[in-house]
Amino acid sequence: MKKVTVAKGDGIGPEIMEATLDIIMAAGAQIEIEEIEVGEKVYLSGNTAGIAKESWDVIRRNKVFLKAPITTPQGGGYKSLNVTTRKFLGLYANVRPCASFHPFVQTKHPVMDVVIIRENEEDLYAGIEHQQTDEVVQCLKLISRPGCEKIVRYAFEYARQYGRKKVTCFTKDNIMKQTDGLFHKVFDEIAAEYPEIENEHWIIDIGAAKMADTPEAFDVIVMPNLYGDILSDVAAQIAGSVGLAGSSNIGEECAMFEAIHGSAPRRAGQNMANPSGLLQGAVMMLTHIGQTEVAEKVQNAWLKTIEDGIHTYDLYKEETSSRLVGTKEFAQAVIANLGQQPQKLPPVNYAKDKAITLPRYKRKSPAAKELTGVDLFVHWPGTDADELAGKVTAIAQDGIQLTMITNRGIKVWPEGFRETFCTDHWRCRFKRTDGGVLSKKEIIGLLESAESHNLDIIKTENLYKFDGKDVYSLGQGQ
Ligand code: NAD
């Protein structure tokens, strides 16, 4: 008997959770449920995290968490419980299978069967944001080598386990050469370890367009957090309905399973919602805890129910459905089909499936790191880059010179364009005239000099060579 933490959530959450649990228990799931309260009530009681400390203890003890959607109250100060849970528990892989069930669920993409594997802990979701000047705010995009290695390896291991033929990587590394560039580089490195699986990389914009238009061209797609968040909803929606897709959030110790949709408050308490998304999450959970026979039984009964045309309102169409049902009746229909196989849709076979575990990330030996310059970011309300260059040159120390000024990344000095629009946020790059190494003391000297010249430095960014290679972006147009 495996102990599982369950949260019934908000809105349609309690109804779809009840339906899901009824189905998996009827199928013989060997689980003991420990329920916790998370979400709206907890938020509104004054807890901005939406979860009590004791509930964390339960989640960490049981290690497996089945969570219904929750409502994050409007207004400032409330932290997303999903993001916090994924990051606190190290749930680095978010797996979202998006398949169409043609002709039983209407879709423009009858042969779609895509699995989106989304990095779940970093990228812009680090949530590190600052206002720096009157006009400019900043969000840090953090991409790490361990983060990339774990998610990319997970994608290839997933493909291997589920007999998938191809893993595609989506990034925007033509623009973000360091962050997305690292993701792409790691993808190429790890892909080479799986020669039996085809691999390819697409720039995210055209890749996303292709996926929305021709999803059958893709199999497993791995991508950084933000892109994965957006594109997995697109994929679920074009497969038929966001109400159909479940997701797993996998970490080295813990895992969380859920529907991809939200709490649909307008549908709450009306016995209308489709429990399929959460049920798909529960099927992934059963596989994860080794109860593959139960998972298979549930999935085949569910496929049979969909194929029989027994549909909730979100899927119901006169041409493809036979009966419009509520949440409870849908669950009863799936239960009645337990032990049966779908006749037209391919039945699933999970006998060989198991939780995917990766070797722990081992930190690599450090590279030779040399400090070769510094970017000073200046809050300055003027508009003429030459005028700023004059002021900033005055703070330069012996042997250190101003080499460039950019505004929102585009070079505006030397030889900027009059047409370039400038904000009050300027990056001033300093390097040694001889191209040599800089000391931290010299940077402090620059900052002290800036202070005495009344220049408002809002942050600095060190420029490094790692193993002899410059690892920072040039100014656009440089
Ligand atoms: P939503 O996913 O709740 O609803 C979007 C649309 O899909 C609505 O029209 C809804 O009626 C429909 N829908 C969603 N699930 C359905 C189902 N199972 N059956 C039938 N129809 C379904 O998104 P939203 O309206 O943007 O957000 C509502 C609340 O959910 C917000 O408070 C949001 O913060 C929260 N949310 C929670 C999660 C989560 O807990 N994982 C995820 C997304 C949104």
Image: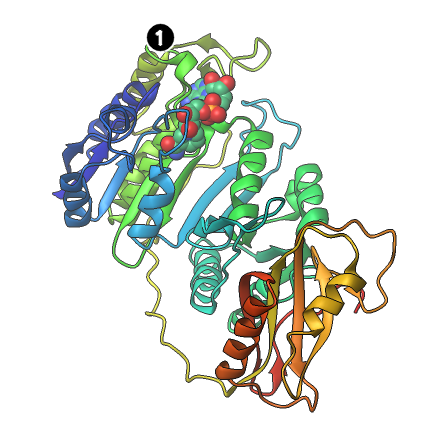
Kindly identify the residue that appears in the image at 65 percent across and 78 percent down: 396
The reply to whether residue 75 is in sight is yes
In this view, 95 is above or below 184:
above
Within the displayed image, which quadrant is ligand 1 positioned in?
Answer: top left
Q: Position of residue 329 (x, y in %)?
A: 33, 12
In front here: 57 or 477?
Answer: 477
Q: Which residue is mark 1?
A: 270
In front here: 440 or 33?
Answer: 440
In front here: 61 or 375?
Answer: 375
In this view, 372 is above or below 244:
below
Q: Position of residue 46 (x, y in %)?
A: 24, 29
**Mark 1: amino acid:** Gln
Kindly identify the residue that appears in the image at 37 percent across and 25 percent down: 73
Image position of 384 (left or right of 324) = right
As helix, strand or loop, the secondary structure at mark 1 comes to loop
In front here: 322 or 312?
Answer: 312
Kindly identify the residue that appears in the image at 49 percent across and 10 percent down: 322
Quarter of the image that includes the C terminus:
bottom right
Q: Position of residue 382 (x, y in %)?
A: 73, 52
Quarter of the image that includes the N terminus:
top left
Q: Residues within 10 Å of mark 1 (few under 14, many from 20)?
A: few
In this view, 201 is above or below 49:
below
Q: Position of residue 188 (x, y in %)?
A: 59, 70
Image position of 402 (left or right of 227) = right
